[in-house]
Image (cartoon, rainbow, N blue to C red):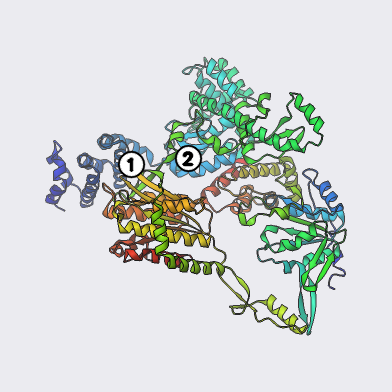
Amino acid sequence: MLHEDSAAERMIVDEPYYEPLGNECDVFAAAVANQLPILLKGPTGCGKTRFVHHMAWRLRRPLVTVACHDDLTAADLVGRYLVKGGETQWIDGPLTHAVRLGAICYLDEIVEARKDTTVIIHPLCDDRRVLPIDKRGELLPVPREFALVISYNPGYQSVLKDLKQSTRQRFVALEFDYPAAEVEQKIVRTESGIDDQTAHRLVRFGVHTRNLKGSGLDEGASTRLLVNAAKLIATGIVPTVACDTAVAHALTDDPELLHAIHELANAVF
Amino acid sequence: MNRADLDRVAGVLLARLPRAADVISDIAAMEREGREFVCHWTEVIALSSEELAAHFIASAPQAFRTLDERAVEDWIIEAMDAFDRHGLGAGIEVFDALPVFAARRAGTQASCTLESVAGFLRYFVRGLGGRALTIARDPLAHTDSERIFLPPTLAVADAHDINARLYKATAVYLWAQNRYGTWQQRALETALRVLDAITTWPVFRKLEAVRLGACLARDLPGLARDMASVGFAHAEEAAAWAHFSAEAASLTEPGATAHDSLALVERFATRTLPEEPRYTGGMRPDKVREVLMARVPREKAALQRALGALERELAPRDEDVEADASVAAEPANRFTLEESVDGANRDVGLQYDGEQVPLDADLQALLASIMQDLGELGDDYLEPGTGDAPYSGDAEAGGTPGTAPAEVTGGHVHVYPEWDYTRERFREAFCALTEHTVPDGSDEFMIATETKYRGLAKSIRRVFEAILSEAQRQRRQPHGDELDLDALVDAHVDFVQGHEMSDRLYTHLHKAGRDVAVMFMVDMSGSTKGWVNDAEREAMLLLAEAVETLGDAFAIYGFSGRTNKRCEVYRVKTFDEPYSLAVRRRISGMSPKAYTRMGVAIRHLGALLAAVPARTRLLVTLSDGKPEDYGSYRGRYGIEDTRHALLEVRRAGIHPFCITIDREAPAYLPHMVGTANYTVVDEVQKLPYKVADIYRRLTT
């Protein structure tokens, strides 16, 4: 098998920086201890992925991350036979791999994946705790250490991108949002190394753009975008230019909105 | 062009003027281009009103002496707009008052129009936060606490850039009045009681300018710098203002409120105060009060309703039922409010029994708006109401006493501009359009159609179902354009393990899933009476069935009308409505009405379609001839307006397509809709057979 030593590779050695927003760390640890799967909800760039990394480090578990896309099938997750030197050989998919390792498996943006993936997620998530591998006629028992985490952005208001009740009701759900101003300021400062005042202004700017959500923008600036802008500023880019390039143009192409966001950046700096 | 030509063009008109001969010789003395310009516009204006044209020609030579050609054109357009909106008298007034226009014009070279900045300002002010304020137009810059009124043009400074920045500064300043509590209810009531409109309001206004200036400088330093740089034309004025600000320094402290400004009014009331910054605008406290009085009880009720709904949601979580009963016996309020302010941003949090409650965006906005009005919430505000209806922003939007009458009654009249090719401009707010529902038609027609086209309907459905099944990327196909690697590997595995190999090893690439929204716009003009209308209805019945099979979102509207004041569209099926027997009855009920004013219908239905989320949006018009209406909307005018309306919807990401049975159509349709965007059905009877086929070609 391919994964003899990969558990070590998938361990997270250095502590990923994460600023808790509430009791989510305790809830996550408790859910994992009780073998309950976890659903992370929240807008893009608010720290869901970072949180999983942090928890994997904290719980000392290997982490297998799968970024889901619209062509991802159940076979891609579970695994498939390949032919090698005239012999067939079974190759585990990332989900099977994670089960064998007793790792945390993180399926990012699960709604993007094909509908048939839910079929294999369901038996993993309830008290059966098995992974059916149809092609091998195998029911892989799931070890106590394995944990399934999925994430999903409820902000996409498309009927095609919604999570079915039968799926979501198997999960412990943790809701994420952009952190409160002081916390976000601390995050921006810590991640980029800019001074406190600049971080403060950047966060204010971020909130201004979030005011535009629903009246022009689909989403306001995420914490991730603010951190990107802060990193540019830390390396000597003028703040308003950093806001334009890292935030405004990342959010929209509409000239009037761009102008407005540009002026909002000018307003706070 | 010689004098005889001029006589011919203007002769009739000039007969109305006392000094006809003088005017003609004046025009004859002009340069050739000028004469042609005058003749062209005289003809254009005469189409609207000969009387108006006469007044134009009388002032034209004078206009050419004082204005350049571009300005003359603007002058003409202003007069014609006045004519369109307020009648002949208003149009003549503009032409006769040439010196007034010329004087204004001299100042407008540097001027900035609200139109050019309104879009940006709307987003900008929204981004600053607080209650959502809209931008509206009024000669006096002021706010009524829901709208920011700005003058239509700004020519205070002699540079365009400064005027544009002054617009921004004015909008921000008026936003600040709302955000930093100038119009908080208690302060406003006190101010209205103690201040006098003539003597002391201006003092209060200036003191508030000091206070708000400081707030802005604290919270939005970059913006405050920009505002300071355009606030005054001269350094002395700025210095005088700075001196005054220093005297009222207590207002620049963080935490100063409108009450502090009020308290200082007396001290400064007897002194001559410097001019405030140019962006300050005016105050209309009476207007604010009116809007506030309507909003406060409305929002209070909405909040209590929302809290009631929230409590019903939260209460079952209480584990201890007995404890719950005891709490219910207590009148104590279980909701508490927490506010955190960071700069210009204000965040309101709600707690229930000391636990943070997640707020949806509507409720958050509601709480923020209430806090903006009251500064703090009275206890009665947090008492959950018992009303059943959950809070909905829509429910609050209209119908409550106090909202502007235009919003209440104007819900059903839509106003659209119309393109006038002779002027090469829009006639602003020219068409008034109303929506009506088509009455149910006879079941006989429906049944007759179903019987008549039974075979056709079946084959249409089959064809459309085929479209549906192939509208994806298919894996494991016996034939295809690419190898399916997964299938190949599986097949090989089967082979090696000694099983039977599959021959389905290809992927077949098809267009991705359908994501189509289509608006059918059916001509219900009088000319369709008879077999055209029958064919249209039959075609729509068959087509609706087919489109429903495909699962595409679709709507059906008829259109007609008489003159620009009575444009009408007839609802047969909206996008949200499922396709049903009721819809089929309404299709049967479509009957010929009046004329074909197409442009306004396209603008209206295009806007409805643009609001539907779909990758492909189609606007299919079904008509029997040229756009035509009572009055001037015929011939080239109608075609050009329709063409322009189609260009507008195309810009909004909509594909227009015209199906027509007019045999003369090839003469004008390519110009009106573009060569590839129409089809002519040469025999009416074939229409039902053709439309489904046309639709299939369009969407696959």
Vertical comparison of B474 with A164: above or below: below
Crowdedness of circle 1 by 10 Å Cα count: few (<14), some, many (20+)?
few
Q: CA distance from mark 1 to mark 2?
A: 40 Å
**Amino acid on which the number 2 mark rests in the picture:** Ile
- Does residue B528 appear to the left or right of A267 in the view shown? left
Residue at label 1?
Answer: B565
Q: Chain of mark 2?
A: B
The amino acid at mark 1 is Lys
Depth order, front residue of B562/A95? B562
Front residue (pair B622, B205): B622
- N-terminal-most mark, 1 or 2: 2
Number of marks drawn:
2
Residue B162 is marked as 2
Quarter of the image holding residue A250?
Answer: bottom right
Q: Closer to us: mark 1 or mark 2?
A: 1
The spot of residue B256 in percent (x, y) is 64, 25
Q: Is residue B297 visible?
A: yes
Residue B690, percent from left and from top = 39, 66
Q: Is residue B225 visible?
A: no
Picture coordinates of residue B676, whole percent (x, y)? 39, 66
Identify the element where label 2 is drawn. Answer: helix
For the residue pair B452 and B312, the one nearer the viewer reads as: B452
**Circles 1 and 2: CB atoms closer than 8 Å:** no
